[in-house]
Amino acid sequence: MSDIEKIEQQDRATFESIKKALLVGVHMSGGESELCREHLKELGELAKTLGVKEVREIYCPVKKFNAPTYIGSGKVEEFRDIVAAEGIDVIIFDDSITPNQQKNIENVAKVPVIDRTEVILEIFGLHARTKEAMLQIEVAKIRHQLPRLKRMWTHLSRQRGASGGGSSRGTGEKQIEIDRRLLKHKLRSVEREIKDVVRGREQTRKGRLRSGVPTFSIVGYTNAGKSTLLNALTGSEVLVEDKLFATLDTTARAYQLPNRSKIVLVDTVGFIRKLPHSLVKAFRSTLEEVCYTDVLIHLLDCSKKGSMARFEATMQVLEELGIKDKPVIVVLNKIDLLKSKEHIRKFNVLYDNVIAVSAVTHEGFDDLLSALEIEASRFCKKMHLRIDQSNYKLIDEITREGRVIHTDYEGNDVLLEVALPEHMERKAKPFLVE
């Protein structure tokens, strides 16, 4: 086992041993205190997804950020006293802090210090199932580790101090360079593997595009109920848990609407505020699945406070991907948990095409299915056809691939009024009745 692997194993052991965490939110004095509290509550949910049993929150208003410790020496000493008095196992910052700041705080507080990025990376590592997701997480972890190698090798400094010699310093510095080269080599190797996996996924996607069946991607904030909605509509068994990032992998399912229109429903990875840049970059190929969709189903948990901010956070990511102009159906989920419908009315005022549903009780599903049918119809062409009954293979294909509106018979001919997807238009065109 390499030294890097040993460090990774130690990190996993650290997470597994956490029972109580001190969560730290930082904001500028005199502003954004409420937003800081909301973000810290979300960090608590992330921590509990990792198995942390208990969290203690602390809010730090600062006049300016401190370079050595981010929050100032006085606050760090306060943390040390809280850690000792309350049996805290780890300090978790809601913001990204530098490796040097982590080290300086750890030296005083005497417990591990991590940030939101490391928590999300660990959750992603636990929940990845497909090869691509695992590779993407490995890339993100390597990019996160590279600037932290010096901090990882603080154990060499302790060895140097114990021995009293000066030669081990050079050994440590050389080992950092060796590890840096190893990580960069590993990064290139994993990125090549990802390209191979992406090529395979692109072939699958091209097959869907050639079929002409419109694709509807379910997007939204993590834990909005995307997998629950996919399961409720299609009868699938995609993993569903009341946890942030319970599923990371894209799932596509064929689905026939009540009017017999065919679509593909895609469940995508959830979004989150303060998503680390390294993860956005690493998961870009997964998120790009949304770029090739025809219609977005923007799902939102409307039962939670701050749902408007979650909506905007998702829209920001979609804008970064360059797909903000695609048709969108806004679906407000979990209305069975609402005490008042006022929240729904606000969304109806601000946005078009808003549907309120419960993926658990199926309330509002008739409205949702009608909205899906309307959008799907935009990708079909209505045609009047006259086909000889002897051409039964074509008639069968048209009735399977298209949506038959009306059928009649005249002599040996079948008269069809049908809505056909684009890929069927060429075959049907010779039988078109003007």
Image (cartoon, helix red, strand yellow):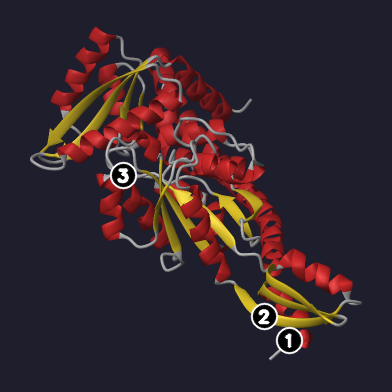
Give the left or right position of residue 45, taking residue 342 as reference: right
Please report the residue visible at 71 percent of the width from the left and 67 percent of the height from the top.
211
> Which mark lies nearer to you, 1 or 3?
1
Q: Nearer the viewer, residue 262 or 224?
A: 262
Q: Please, what is the three-letter code of the amino acid marked with disc 1?
A: Leu
Please report the residue visible at 66 percent of the width from the left and 42 percent of the height from the top.
131
x, y percent for residue 77? 18, 19
Q: Pointer 3: residues within 10 angstroms few (<14), some, or many (20+)? A: some
- For residue 67, above or below residue 420: above
Query: Visible in this render: residue 64?
Result: yes
Q: Residue furthest right?
A: 390
**Mark 1 falls on what kind of element?**
loop
Q: Who comes first in sequence, dot 1 or dot 3?
A: 3
C-alpha separation, residue under disc 1 versus residue under disc 3? 49 Å
Residue highlighted by disc 3: 307
**Snapshot quadrant of residue 20:** top left
User: Could you tell me which quadrant the C terminus lies in?
Assistant: bottom right
Residue highlighted by disc 1: 432
Please report the residue visible at 44 percent of the width from the left and 61 percent of the height from the top.
328
Q: Pointer 1: residues within 10 angstroms few (<14), some, or many (20+)? A: some
x, y percent for residue 299? 43, 49
> Which mark lies nearer to you, 3 or 2?
2
**Mark 2 falls on what kind of element?**
strand
C-alpha separation, residue under disc 1 versus residue under disc 2? 7 Å
- For residue 1, above or below residue 378: above
User: Could you tell me which quadrant the N terminus lies in?
Assistant: top right
Residue highlighted by disc 2: 383
- Which of the numbered marks, if any, corresponds to residue 59? none
Q: Please, what is the three-letter code of the amino acid marked with disc 3?
A: Ser
Q: Nearer the viewer, residue 216 or 257?
A: 257
